[in-house]
Image (spheres, rainbow, N blue to C red):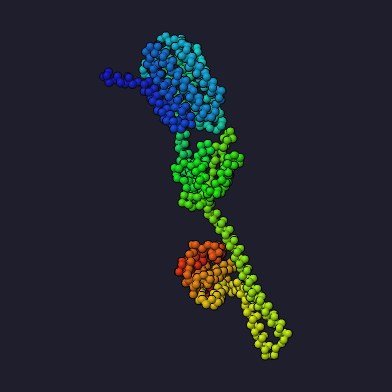
Amino acid sequence: MDLLCQPCRLMSWVTIIWSMTASACLTLALIHLIIWSRQRDAWANLLFSLAALGTAAFTVFEIAMMRAETPAAFAFALRWIHVPGWIVILSIAGFVRLYLKAGRYWLLWSICIVRTLSLILNFLLGQNLNYWEITNLRHIQFLGETVSIAEGVSNHWMLVGQTAYLLLLIFVVDATLTAWRQGDRRRALVVGGGMIFFVLGATGETTLVLWQLVQLPFIASLPALATISAMAYELTLDAQRAGQLSRDLRESEQRMALATDAANLGIWIRDLVRNEIWATDKWRNLFGFEKAERIDLNSYLQKLHPADRDAVRRTLAKAVERDGHYETEYRVVRPDGQLRWIASRGRVEFNGANQAVHVRGTSLDITERKQAEEAAQNLSGLLIHAQEAERTRLARELHDDLSQSLALLAVELDMLGQQPPAGSVVSERMQEFSARIRNLSSGVHRLSHELHPAKLEQLGLVAAVRGFAKELGAAHQMAVECEFQDVPRRLPDDIALCLYRIVQEGLQNVVKHSGAIGAKVILRADAKELCLEISDNGSGFNSGATTGKSSLGLVGMRERVRLVNGQIAIQSRHGEGTKIQVRVPLPPAPTGEAGK
């Protein structure tokens, strides 16, 4: 029976509680030491780890004093317990200043100096800082077992160590009140309150024991454990917040990546000290860099068009030296030989010594915009050229045809007046003059109709298209078939003129370029839109390769359709004819009379 009870006596409450305290502190210290080793700027974790290690060591020396069998063994443990005590006090003070971002520096330095001085005195005066000499050990009952406490001559130099505890208490209270006033009340309550509890509990208990006012062993490790727990709780919350921030950051980065991809935008950071450029995958793709390829200024400039490199280099140098920011546009030659236009803008960051250290910026692919600008410039030139060509044609027709015919008619009329012929001849001549005047009138009407179709306003789109098709077919011996379905008599002027001009341009292109012997015009409408289709059986062309002056008519068609919010499709292949399809939305209006 005694053998069965022996393990129970050996494994006492003192052993259980103090061993659990030491184990918990060591575990927490190891965890946060690993965190600090991976994040060397996490000083709060390092200070916590030191405080936890010191508390664990403090616990071991407390057990050694309670288990001491001789005054010398007790004195030895009490002397060396000041080393982890020194570590705990300094670590806690530093943790409070760093974590609460409060506390007076002079108090912090005073704690460090006074506590270090007490540690030195601990090894120089007497058996330890607390006793000149331990003369006897008294055995008392504590938590159901017998433990040792010291009796001896007190060392008055221990007031130096107790002063350090008093300074720590003042420092923690001051930092806690400051953090509370600044609004960080939860941290002030948890961290500051835990520290105050530790200082009051540990200092009060050890002071009463050392001055032999109470008969208890040293138990400062228990309030220290409460402080360690409060510190660990706060650091755990910080880790949770950091994890959430990390997840939010990853989500934000994913959103930014989607946005930059959608905008064809690349982001980059240039380290001026290390001559290295960090860039997003989109930026690397814009310039033709591999994902893992190292990028510096020279390799970046090599991707640029040779004609643009010096200008970009000067712009970058000017921004670094003076301006601090820049905007520029340049061409990039990709590995496949493709030429892309890039717009870049950046901002230079300077350190405290006003030295440039980083350049952050964005690069945007503006190739489509540049191509549109170039196309607009080309179109502007083509339109001016076409306008001048049309004026030249009208002037030539007016001068060579109408003007000369009128001049000849005037001369003949003048001669007729000077030498009147016989009566029967006069009648013939007048009929001839009348026919020639009708021809001149027809020519004027034709030119006027080309400039502005009056029939379109007077009779509507159907009549105007039918009339133009008939005249063109008759003039060029080509069959032009027209088909109309439910086309309103009255249409908005811009829509009617747009479709008429497309019919005019389309049929004239058939005559000039296709070599077709026939063409067909279909115009139909419903309640929502008007559809036009022009087709021929001519030679056709490559609709995707029309450039220059030959495409001006097609460009004009597209622009007219765009102005009325419509859509146009041109289908053509060599030897298979051409088909032009136009769809224009109709505004809500009463259904008019349909042309037939």
Q: Nearer the viewer, residue 135 or 299?
A: 299
Residue lying farthest front?
Answer: 306
Relative depth, front residue between 465 and 228:
465
Q: Is residue 392 above or below residue 10?
A: below
Query: Could you tell me residue 12's position as x and y percent?
Result: 35, 20
Residue 307, position in %: x, y? 55, 49
Q: Which of the 4 quarters of the picture holds residue 82?
A: top left
| Spot occupied by residue 579 in the image (x, y as percentages of width and height) | 48, 68
Q: Residue furthest right?
A: 418
Q: Residue at (55%, 58%) from the top-left corner?
A: 375
Residue 499 visible in the current orientation: no
Q: Is residue 237 above or below residue 439?
A: above
Residue at 44% x, 11% y is 127
* Most foreground residue, 408 or 54: 408
Taking the spot 46% from the left edge, 67% from the top edge, the residue there is 574
Horizontal and vertical percent for residue 303? 50, 47
352 w.r.t. 535: above or below: above
